[in-house]
Amino acid sequence: MKGLIALKSKEDYIERVLYTEEEIATRAKEISAQISEDYKDIAKPLLTVGILNGAVMFYTDVVRRLTIPVQFDFLIASSYDANSHTSGKVNILKNLDNDPKGRDILLVEDIIDSGTTMNFLINYFLDKKANSVKICTLLNKPSRRKVEVKIDYCGFDVPDEFIVGYGLDFAQHYRNLPYLGILNRSVYGGK
Ligand code: IMP
Ligand code: MG
């Protein structure tokens, strides 16, 4: 990434801030309350699965306020290459530590774009005899959908722009920004 080191202020790489830290926190609290309500009669702890690395910030926001019994787990899936083109093929690079059989699973994702990753994971865990699989995503980009996915909990619908921050990266950069912003096209050579 030529020039990355030289970038100094966020104006150099962020076109526009979409959601501030405060707005994200408010939305995450609302979603936690809804999840706690929906699973209030759950028999076994909810298996909350953070999809690494992008969902890590949103995952902690959501799980810390759940009032139901939960267990943590994490998964790494890859369907995207570093140039932001989806490959259409999903690989599980790190699987769950828990057996999904008979469990209620909540997949927590950063963004649903083509839908390929989440569609694959839902079917994968249903094949493994999970009791239920639901999706909680910070962002949804409906205009880019290629595969239909039922989203149970969604932070925000976003436009067809490349978004970074709050866990989301471009080629592993910008994940630590405390807000969500549209990446300036000049960063990745676009017009
Ligand atoms: P999908 O399988 O096409 O839905 O892709 C989902 C994955 O693509 C996400 O988990 C992200 O890693 C990545 N992705 C899609 N859109 C963006 C974006 O705007 N910014 C950062 N990552 C993105
Ligand atoms: Mg991801």
Image: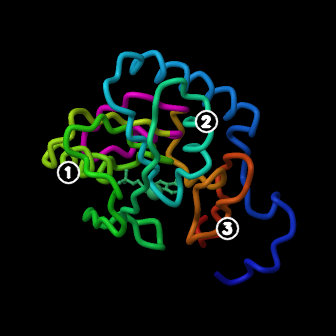
Residue matched to label 3: 186
Q: Which residues are magenta?
A: 138-155
First-in-chain label (3 vs 1): 1
Q: Is residue 34 left or right of residue 89?
A: right
User: Is residue 122 positioned above or below 34 on the image?
Assistant: below
Residue matched to label 1: 124
Q: Which quadrant does the N terminus fall into?
A: bottom right
Q: Residue at x 65, y 57 (%)?
A: 183
Q: Amino acid at mark 3?
A: Ser
Residue 41 in magenta stretch: no
| In this view, the mark in front (3 or 1) | 1
* Numbered circle sitting on residue 101: none
Quarter occupied by residue 86: bottom left
Q: Residue at x 86, y 69 (%)?
A: 8
Residue matched to label 2: 64
Q: Residue at x 74, y 81 (%)?
A: 3
Element at badge 3?
Answer: helix
First-in-chain label (1 vs 2): 2
Residue 70, given in percent of the width and then of the height, sits at 46, 36
Q: Amino acid at mark 1?
A: Tyr
Element at badge 1?
Answer: helix
First-in-chain label (3 vs 2): 2
Q: Amino acid at mark 2?
A: Arg
Q: CA distance from mark 3 to mark 1?
A: 38 Å
Q: Residues within 10 Å of mark 1 (few under 14, many from 20)?
A: some
Q: Residues within 10 Å of mark 3 (few under 14, many from 20)?
A: few
